[in-house]
Image (cartoon, rainbow, N blue to C red):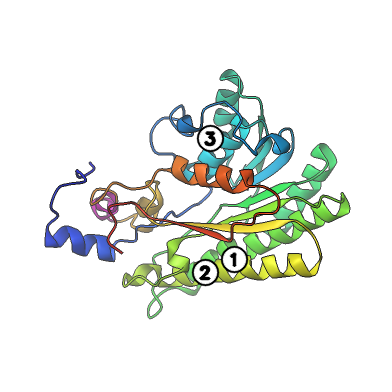
């Protein structure tokens, strides 16, 4: 349920909103909100101005089996790109690829199984992309996860899981994507990190404090990457997109033992949808080569903080 935009909210609702883990969490197992045919529907099939130069080029999207990753993958296929969508399980990606083909989209979605917590898997994926598709022109680091491990009582394993995917996998994919571009003399590539507003502010909700720390790392890594790309005298661009409350399965995974609490995350306000983030990705890619968008911060209009 979504409350009307003009409805007065109770104090309990506002407290829930303040303490909610509302966040665009991403993982390779996230399911999309709504039917697959709805995701990315607003983007249509007409090429956006500025996207023509990306037609037939290759984008890698991590965590593409659902949620934001699936919406982004679909939007890129609609714009005529070849998209390698990776996740630990690829059944959903295979279904989405078939639907994109049936819909007559000009691009192609190529499913690839990859466990992003394994550097060996990541390197193997980039090797396969190199041998089968030349290399990566766009890298969209979308995959991420959260564990309900607080700073005072959280498990070390939970912290490691978050750091491994949210920080290390993102960094490894970035490094390998840059190497792929450099060896092919691609000077106009783009690396986009799907970040979070949790990478810009620390929520009072203790279960996402470590997660927030990993997202602050993404903020720093993106700016550091921008600076290093300038030092390397390339025109490859770096961007992060930082949404707040996106209606995915994030809350249900974070609060897997309390589905009512998870559901309440998305009931207190009208949340962002995965395709809203996908549209931001298309906007970033469609800007002229001399324009670099450092960060897009996105909140639902109804959100208080």
Q: Residues within 10 Å of mark 3 (few under 14, many from 20)?
A: many
- Residue 249 can be seen in this image: yes
Q: Label 1's element?
A: helix
Which quadrant of the figure has residue 118?
bottom right
**Label 2, label 1: how many angstroms apart (C-alpha)?**
6 Å
Residue marked by disc 2: 214
Q: Residue placed at 55% from the left, 24% from the top?
A: 99
Say which of marks 1 and 3 sits in front: 1
- Which contiguous range is marked in magenta? 258-265
Looking at the picture, tell me which residue is in the foreground, 181 or 114: 181
Q: Residue placed at 47% from the left, 60% from the top?
A: 196
**Label 1, label 3: how many angstroms apart (C-alpha)?**
25 Å
Q: Residue placed at 33% from the left, 57% from the top?
A: 255
Q: Position of residue 98 (x, y in %)?
A: 59, 24
Q: Earlier in the sequence, mark 3 or mark 2?
A: 3
Horizontal side, residue 123 vs residue 107: left or right: right
Say which of marks 3 and 2 sits in front: 2
Residue marked by disc 3: 92
Residue marked by disc 1: 167
Q: Is residue 260 magenta?
A: yes
């Amino acid at each position: 349920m979504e409350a009307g935009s003009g409805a007065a909210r109770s104090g309990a609702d506002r407290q829930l909103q303040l303490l909610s883990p509302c966040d665009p969490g991403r993982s390779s197992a996230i399911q999309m909100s709504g039917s697959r045919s709805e995701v990315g529907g607003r983007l249509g099939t007409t090429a956006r101005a500025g996207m023509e130069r990306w037609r037939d080029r290759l984008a890698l999207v991590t965590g593409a089996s659902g949620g934001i990753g699936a919406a982004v993958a679909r939007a890129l296929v609609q714009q005529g790109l070849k998209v390698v969508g990776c996740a630990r399980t690829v059944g959903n990606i295979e279904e989405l690829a078939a639907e994109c083909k049936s819909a007559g989209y000009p691009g192609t979605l190529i499913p690839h199984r990859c466990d992003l917590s394994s550097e060996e898997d990541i390197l193997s994926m980039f090797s396969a992309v190199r041998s089968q598709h030349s290399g990566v022109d766009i890298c969209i680091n979308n995959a991420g996860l959260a564990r309900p491990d607080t700073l005072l009582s959280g498990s070390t394993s939970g912290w490691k899981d978050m750091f491994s995917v949210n920080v290390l996998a993102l960094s490894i994919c970035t490094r390998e994507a840059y190497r792929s571009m450099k060896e092919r003399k691609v000077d106009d590539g783009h690396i986009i990190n799907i970040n979070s507003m949790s990478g810009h502010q620390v929520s009072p909700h203790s279960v996402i404090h470590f997660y927030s720390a990993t997202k602050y790392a993404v903020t720093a890594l993106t700016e550091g990457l921008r600076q290093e790309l300038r030092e390397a005298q390339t025109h490859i661009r770096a961007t992060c997109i930082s949404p707040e409350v996106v209606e995915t399965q994030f809350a249900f995974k974070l609060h897997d033992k309390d589905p009512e609490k998870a559901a309440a995350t998305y009931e207190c306000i009208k949340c962002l949808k995965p395709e809203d983030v996908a549209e931001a990705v298309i906007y970033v890619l469609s800007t002229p080569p001399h324009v670099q968008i450092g960060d897009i911060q996105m909140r639902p209009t109804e959100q208080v903080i």
